[in-house]
């Protein structure tokens, strides 16, 4: 695999990634640093691709890991996220779930009423 090169801008989210076990439709192999995958954030406009930097070893099927996530088009989800928001990860099929643990890009933070 090629060396992971971070984007030249701040990341968008910190997340916890949990991959499904292979026996439940998950991948056969671990993810890798810098992997780029589509995400289903429940947005009717479609999936939003993103790139991961794992904060430890990339997860294997059936395991979890914290990660930093850069979204390809963060504006697609402007004002939609809160801490704890859950989403699905796609790689030809749904292979896992993610949970937002920190919102770094302020445009993504859900607008809350006073």
Image (tube, rainbow, N blue to C red):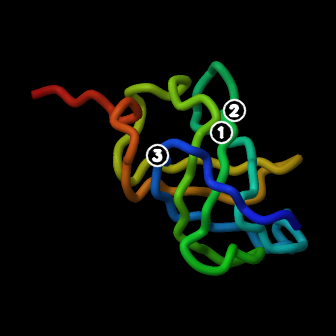
Q: Is residue 28 above or below residue 113?
A: below
Q: Earlier in the sequence, mark 1 or mark 2?
A: 1
Q: Earlier in the sequence, mark 2 or mark 3?
A: 3
Q: Is residue 40 left or right of residue 27?
A: left
x, y percent for residue 75: 51, 24
Identify the element where label 3 is drawn: loop
The numbered mark, 1 or 3, whose residue comes first in the sequence reads 3
Location of residue 51 with respect to 21 vertically, above or below: above
Quadrant showing the N terminus? bottom right
Q: Secondary structure at mark 2?
A: loop
**Quarter of the view holding residue 106:** top left
**What residue sits 49% from the left and 48% below the top?**
11
Q: Residue at x 22, y 30 (%)?
A: 112
Q: Position of residue 24 (x, y in %)?
A: 82, 68
In this rendering, is residue 17 above or below 79? below
**Disc 1 versus disc 3: distance between alpha carbons?**
22 Å
Q: Which residue is mark 1?
A: 40
Q: Which residue is mark 2?
A: 47
Name the residue nearer the viewer: 48 or 12: 12
The residue tagged with tag 1: helix, strand or loop? Answer: strand
Where, by quadrant of the figure, is residue 102 drawn?
A: bottom left
Residue positioned 46% across, 46% down in the render? 10
Label 2: how many Cα within 10 Å (few below 14, some 14–19, many 20+): some
Q: Which mark is residue 10?
A: 3
């Amino acid at each position: 695999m090629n060396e992971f090169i971070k984007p030249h801008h701040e990341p968008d989210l910190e997340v916890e990634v949990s991959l499904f076990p292979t026996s439940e439709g998950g991948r056969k192999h671990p993810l890798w640093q810098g992997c780029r995958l589509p995400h289903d954030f429940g947005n009717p406009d479609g999936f939003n691709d993103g790139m991961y930097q794992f904060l430890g070893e990339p997860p294997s099927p059936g395991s979890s890991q914290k990660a930093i996530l850069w979204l390809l088009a963060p504006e697609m989800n402007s004002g939609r996220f809160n801490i704890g928001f859950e989403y699905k990860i796609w790689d030809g099929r749904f292979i896992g779930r993610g949970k937002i643990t920190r919102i770094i890009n302020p445009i993504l933070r859900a607008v809350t009423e006073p």
